[in-house]
Image: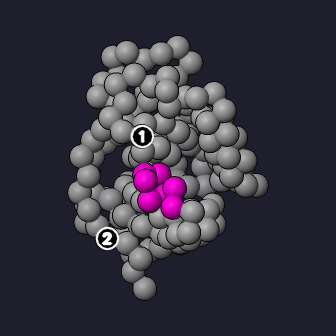
Amino acid sequence: MKNYTIQKRDEFAMIGISVRTSNRDNQAGKDISALFQRFFAEGIMEKIPGRLSDDIINLYYDYAGDHTDPYTVLVGCRVSSLDDLPAGLTGHKVAGGSFAVYTPKGDMPDIIINTWQEVWQTEEYQRSYQGDYDIYGPKAMDPDMPEVEICVGIKKA
């Protein structure tokens, strides 16, 4: 059963905090959880200049190979420019292109984990490994049925 749609997405810039991680031995789960805790505890969102919205983006990029190899995770927000990068924060331009877009609903973080496991096992498209991201917008804050948008970069559809 196909749980995604193919969409074209424009490039965008974002600023936030990052960590290098891997999916081996659940290291990414630990690192991403710690990154989100730090993001909220240190009020990182308020430190991001030129923020275009309060949507939180969890970007996966700089893959050393595929999803089994190390990659970088950046938790932050879309910005109008990378020109005014505060010390201690990371900026990155996310490439546009074709994406398989999933919109899982349900208990967090289970919906994220389960969707990414589905992505890793799919053979319906070829991933580009240029940059994938989760968008935590207003629907993600719904206490009854949170919804997240997961965008997986793919080669030409």
Residue pictured at 39% horizontal, 80% vertical: 2
- Nearer to us: label 2 or label 1: 1
Residue pictured at 52% horizontal, 14% vertical: 87
Q: Amino acid at mark 1?
A: Asp
Furthest residue in direction front, as rendered = 143
Above-or-below relation of 104 to 30 = below
Q: Quadrant of residue 17?
A: top right
Binning the other alpha carbons within 10 Å of mark 2 as few (below 14), some (14 to 19) or many (20 upward) gives: few
Residues 86 and 54: in front is 54
Q: Which residue is mark 1?
A: 54
- Residue 50 shows up from this direction: yes
Q: Is residue 149 magenta?
A: no
Residues 152 and 50: in front is 50
Pinpoint residue 39: horizontal percent, then vertical percent: 60, 34
Furthest residue in direction bottom, as rendered = 1
Q: Which residue is mark 2?
A: 5
Binning the other alpha carbons within 10 Å of mark 1 as few (below 14), some (14 to 19) or many (20 upward) gives: some
Above-or-below relation of 38 to 97 = above
Pinpoint residue 67: horizontal percent, then vertical percent: 55, 55
Q: Is residue 140 magenta?
A: yes
At mark 1, the secondary structure is: loop
At mark 2, the secondary structure is: strand
Quarter of the image with the N terminus in it: bottom left
Q: Amino acid at mark 2?
A: Thr
Residue pictured at 41% horizontal, 67% vertical: 102
Q: Which residues are magenta?
A: 136-142
Q: Is residue 98 left or right of residue 110?
A: left
- Residue 152 shows up from this direction: no
Cα–Cα gap, marks 2 and 1: 24 Å
Residue pictured at 36% horizontal, 39% vertical: 53
